[in-house]
Amino acid sequence: MKTMNVVIFLGLLGLLTCSGAIKLPKGGFEPEPMPPIPTPKPTPACNPRPCRNAGVCVNLANNKYKCNCKRGYYGTNCEMAYGYLTIMAAKQVGNLPDLDGYENQPLGSDLSGDYSDLQVKIVAKQYHGYKKEFKTPVLYNFLKGDINRSYYYGGGYWDSFEVTLYDYDGLYKAPQKIASSSFSLTAQGPNDASYWRAFYVFSGPGKYMQILYKFRWI
C-alpha cells in the first residue's frame, strides 16, 4: 500500500516515466527562496545619551533628537552654560613663600625671606575660546590675610577660570609662579547667585588662597 502511494505521488508530480523509472526535472529541484532578512530597527537618536549637564533627551522623527536643557544651559547638547560672572580673590590662609630671594619685608624687619610680593591673576574662558583676564595690584610684603579684590567679567558662555599666584618683583624681573589651579564653571552651572561659592588654590600643606565667585543665570 505504501509503495502504491509513493507511485501515485510521483506520477502526480510528473516524475515517473512509463517504464516506472523516476525522472528528475531539468536543472534539478528549484531551491526554496530564502526568507527576506529583517531590516534592523534604527537605534533611537537618544541612545547613547547625547545631552550633557543633566539635559533630558527626546527622540524625534527621522532619527533626530532634541535636548531639553536645565535652566542656565544652552546648545544642541546642553553643552554651554550662560551666566554673569564675578570672581573675588578673597584671602590667603597660611604664609605664602617668598620665591624671588629678596627680603620683601618692611624696613626695620628682622625677618628674612618670608614674605611674597603677591599678585593674583584670574583668567576666565568662554566656551568658544574667548578669554578675559583680571590681575590684582601687586601686594608688597604680603604674608597672609584678606585681599578682597573682585572683578565683574560680565555675561557670557563662561566655561572655566584659572587662578595663578605670582611672587612679583618689579618690572625688571619676571614674576615667579607660586601655584595655580583651574575650575569648571560648565560642570558646576549657574544659579541665582544669592551667595558666594568658594574655590581654593593650594600652595602647600595648610596654605591656600580662597577664591569666591558668583555665576548668576539670566
Image (cartoon, rainbow, N blue to C red):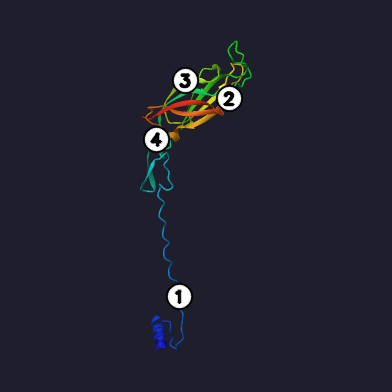
First in sequence, mark 3 or 2: give its number: 3
Q: CA distance from mark 1 to mark 3?
A: 92 Å
Packing grade of label 1 (10 A; few <14, some 14-19, many >=20) is few
- Residue 185, percent from left and from top: 45, 32
- Residue 202, percent from left and from top: 54, 28
Q: Nearer the viewer, residue 73 or 38?
A: 73
Amino acid at pointer 1? Phe
Q: CA distance from mark 3 to mark 2?
A: 19 Å
Pointer 1 residue: 29
Pointer 3 residue: 149
First in sequence, mark 1 or 3: give its number: 1
Q: CA distance from mark 4 to mark 2?
A: 34 Å
Q: Quadrant of the N terminus?
A: bottom left
Q: Secondary structure at mark 3?
A: strand
Nearer the observer: mark 4 or 2; the answer is 2
First in sequence, mark 1 or 4: give its number: 1
Pointer 4 residue: 73
- Residue 46, percent from left and from top: 40, 47
Q: Which mark is residue 177?
A: 2
First in sequence, mark 4 or 2: give its number: 4
Packing grade of label 3 (10 A; few <14, some 14-19, many >=20) is some
Examine the rendered structure and indicate whether residue 21 appears above or below residue 26: below
